[in-house]
Image (cartoon, rainbow, N blue to C red):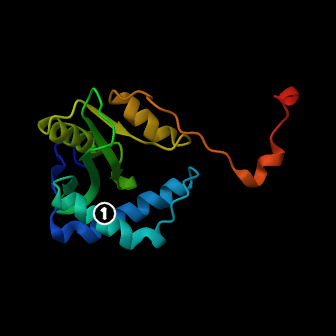
Amino acid sequence: MPPNAQPRIEPAAETDLEAVTDLWVRLAREQRDHDSHVRPAENRATIRETLSAHRVGDGLLVARLDGEVVGFASFTVEHGTFELDVTRGLLSNLYVTPSRRGEGIGTALLEAVEDALAERGVDVVTLEAMADNEAARRFYRRNGYDAHRVAMERNLETKNDTPSKDER
């Protein structure tokens, strides 16, 4: 991006859905390198519907440079079963085309999401990042996010390969 070029962050239009879906498939492919179990191509139709619902609910933003969609973010206000002492927003996806990373586009998207959620009365924003994706975790830490909950998993196919207590 030229020094003065700023991404335009705006709500996604209906005509952006294919481009955003393509970016989500790229995101899911990249996450496979970090042990994600999500199958990118097999979930294309499902995520297009999900992204469309986010768009209708004003929870889908795109980043544009020279008219091209180079990133997106999807988010919502969480409406869970339990009464909480905060109103939580959920950032479900944030992605910037690899060739445009490091130019401030991800930060601009994140700030726009936070502003939109704050306008809706949200107190805290939650998100997930793959444990092995240090670049994403570093990005969120730089932007003020701290670990709040840790998800753990165990492969049951290798259950018998677990070291005994004496071997740990």
In the picture, residue 166 is in which quadrant? Answer: top right
| The one of 41 and 150 positioned closer to us in this rendering | 150
Identify the residue shown where x is 21% and y is 67%: 16
Q: Are there few (<14), some (14-19), or many (20+) residues within 10 Å of tag 1?
A: some
Disc 1: which residue: 50
- Residue at horizontal 46 percent and vertical 59 percent from the top: 28
Q: Residue 55, image x and y in percent?
A: 19, 60
Drawn side of residue 25 relative to residue 17, left or right:
right
Where disc 1 sits, the SS reads helix
On screen, residue 163 versus residue 106, left or right, reads right
The image position of residue 65, as x and y in percent, is 20, 56
From this view, report whether residue 125 is shown above or below residue 44: above
Say if 96 sits above or below 43 in the image: above
- The residue lying toward the viewer, choosing from 12 and 103, is 12
Query: 32 left or right of 91?
Result: right
**Rendered position, 25 above or below 87:** below
**For the point 33% across and 42% down, which residue is it?**
81
Q: Position of residue 143 (x, y in %)?
A: 32, 30
